[in-house]
């Protein structure tokens, strides 16, 4: 009779230890092995669309550095880390900055220059014009987001195919009633304080200039610095605004699209519960299970 409680306690203790070990293993795999990411914005259209889920390889970057052309996951470069080492570790690997996704354009030692040619922005890398077949070739429309919406922004930009009506678009559901025809008007509605902000001029002879989303810039990358840009150049906040990114905050390479749903919800199951019929109309079946380049 006296042995039962001891056995019960040992069993409970053993299960607790197993649970801790399992959680530790999951943490190690998710932190240092691979990651799962959801696209929250249109900065990488049409390579990546809002609402898509991706698999990222984290393991290989422990053995090699990122290379030009990689689509990477990295910690928000604007995040202010704690000075305390323990808290900084938690912020970096457990709970801290948002994950952002861009494409590597420039690597350490590169000279990256953005210019306007024939009315279009182009990139020169170490003096040679860069061929970028991955860039978004579709125009953008700007849709007003009513108050109380799942999105916190006052408007959202979406790629659309002009050859098709709004109710037959290949990327997003677009409501013609909510369209804002002019982007400057959209910015004024969402960010009144930025409505009159213009790109900064490029200083003559500058080798390290980057402005507020300016298409004209020049920067010589230092050691362990990378120049990142979105494939959707007209709708991407990237190194043109926040500058070069340090190697230490890059943690994964996007390699595989798992599934695709036109949704701003963080959890697809929530969207399904809220809109059980409409949800299935917004599933992009042709974008499931694809390798990303």
Image (cartoon, rainbow, N blue to C red):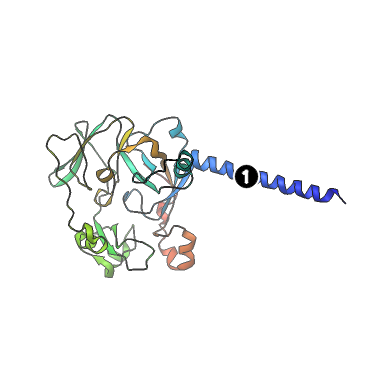
Q: Residue 105's spot in the image, x, y percent?
A: 29, 38
Q: Name the residue under label 1.
A: 20
Quarter-of-image position of residue 189: bottom left
Q: Nearer the viewer, residue 118 or 116?
A: 116
- Which residue reaches farthest front? 84
Q: Residue 141's spot in the image, x, y percent?
A: 25, 60
* Secondary element at tag 1: helix
The relative height of residue 274 versus residue 16 in the rendered view (above or below) is below
Q: Residue 36's spot in the image, x, y percent?
A: 47, 47
The relative height of residue 175 versus residue 113 in the rendered view (above or below) is below
Q: Specify the quadrant that holds the C terminus.
A: top left
Quarter-of-image position of residue 260: bottom left
Q: Residue 167's spot in the image, x, y percent?
A: 31, 66
- Which residue reaches farthest right? 1
Query: Can I make out residue 33 in this image?
Result: no
Residue at (49, 38) in percent of width and height: 32
């Amino acid at each position: 009779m006296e042995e039962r409680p001891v056995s019960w306690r040992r069993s409970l203790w053993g299960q607790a230890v197993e649970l801790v070990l399992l959680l530790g293993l999951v943490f190690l795999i998710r932190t240092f092995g691979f990651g799962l990411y959801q696209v929250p914005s249109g900065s990488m259209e049409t390579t990546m669309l809002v609402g898509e889920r991706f698999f990222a390889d984290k393991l290989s970057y422990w053995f090699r550095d990122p290379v030009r052309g990689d689509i990477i996951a990295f910690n928000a470069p604007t995040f202010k880390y704690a000075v305390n080492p323990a808290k900084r570790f938690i912020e970096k690997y457990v709970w801290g900055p948002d994950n952002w996704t861009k494409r590597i354009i420039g690597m350490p030692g590169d000279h990256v220059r953005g210019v306007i040619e024939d009315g279009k922005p182009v990139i020169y890398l170490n003096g040679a014009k860069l061929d970028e077949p991955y860039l978004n070739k579709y125009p953008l429309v700007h849709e007003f987001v009513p108050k109380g919406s799942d999105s916190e922004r006052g408007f959202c930009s979406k790629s659309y195919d002009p050859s098709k009506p709004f109710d037959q678009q290949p990327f997003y559901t677009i409501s013609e009633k909510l369209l804002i025809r002019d982007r400057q008007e959209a910015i004024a509605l969402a960010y009144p304080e930025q409505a009159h902000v213009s790109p900064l001029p490029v200083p003559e002879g500058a080798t390290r200039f980057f402005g507020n989303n300016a298409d004209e810039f020049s920067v010589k990358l230092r050691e362990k610095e990378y120049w990142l840009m979105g494939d959707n150049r007209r709708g991407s906040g990237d190194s043109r605004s926040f500058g070069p990114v340090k190697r230490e905050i890059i943690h994964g390479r996007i390699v595989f699209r798992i599934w695709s749903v036109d949704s701003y919800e963080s959890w697809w199951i929530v969207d399904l519960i809220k809109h059980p019929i409409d949800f299935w109309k917004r599933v992009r079946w042709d974008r499931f299970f694809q390798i990303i380049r």
